Image (tube, rainbow, N blue to C red):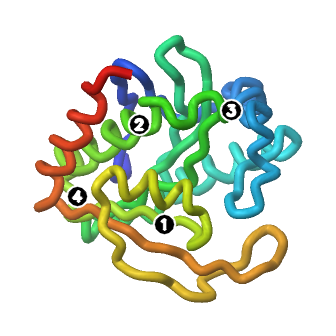
Amino acid sequence: MGWPESVTLSGAHATLRPLLPDDHDGLCAAARDGELWKLWYTAVPSPEGMAAEITRRLELQSRGSMLPFTAFDGAGRIVGMTTYMNIDAVHRRVEIGSTWYAGSAQRTPLNTECKRLLLRHAFEALQCIAVEFRTHRLNTQSRRAIERLGAQLDGMLRAHQRDAQGHLRDTAVYSITAAEWPVVRAHLDWQLSRPR
């Protein structure tokens, strides 16, 4: 088995299960909730492109560079996708990315708990030295969410890559290190314990 191995991660508000081709219809419904593929600053698959995206992620998993998950809410409904990506087994680093959630699941405890589950597994089971997050410089909603986790801005990769329309994207790079994890974990636990 490669590093990291497939695993299911569960909490009170969310479950992350390894991506399966059978998740297709549920993922299409989740993407329709908010028409997420229409957002210009992020790359969410359309319902018509979902099968190809599932295949792409599973192929990257077979090459050892991605571990994709399907996200479920507390009621067991598929609400999106997330991954460990840019996996570096030698240096024990992963990026949490290629994440999207249905419109109705956004700004709920689900995203916080998904990140908490992934970070805990990365630092406590996989013994990562750092976990990275990347997003479009202009995706202020994503940047605020990453900063609320306690991640620090490492810097900006200017003219880093092209988006689906061919425009150059500046990428904001954030990370949490193993030394920072205990404080970040306490902060996330506090966020999840607050009354809604």
Residue 132, image x, y percentages: 37, 64
Residue at the image point whose x is 64% and y is 28% from the top: 104
Label ID, residue 134: 1
Residue under the image location 38 percent in, 68 percent down: 174
Instruction: Determine the CA span between mark 4 and mark 1.
Output: 17 Å
120 or 36, which lies in front? 36
Label 2 crowd bin: few (<14), some (14–19), many (20+), radius 10 Å: many
- Report the amino acid beneath label 2: Cys
Density class for disc 3 (Cα within 10 Å; few <14, some 14-19, many ≥20) is few
Q: Tell which circle, 1 or 2, labels the residue nearer the N-terminal end.
A: 2
Residue 144: where, in percent of width, then height?
Answer: 46, 56
Residue occupying the far front of the picture: 195
Residue 64 visible to the viewer: no
Residue to which mark 3 is pinned:
21
Q: Which residue is mark 2?
A: 114
Please give the residue where the numbered disc 4 appears in the rendered image.
128
Q: Is residue 190 left or right of residue 162?
A: left
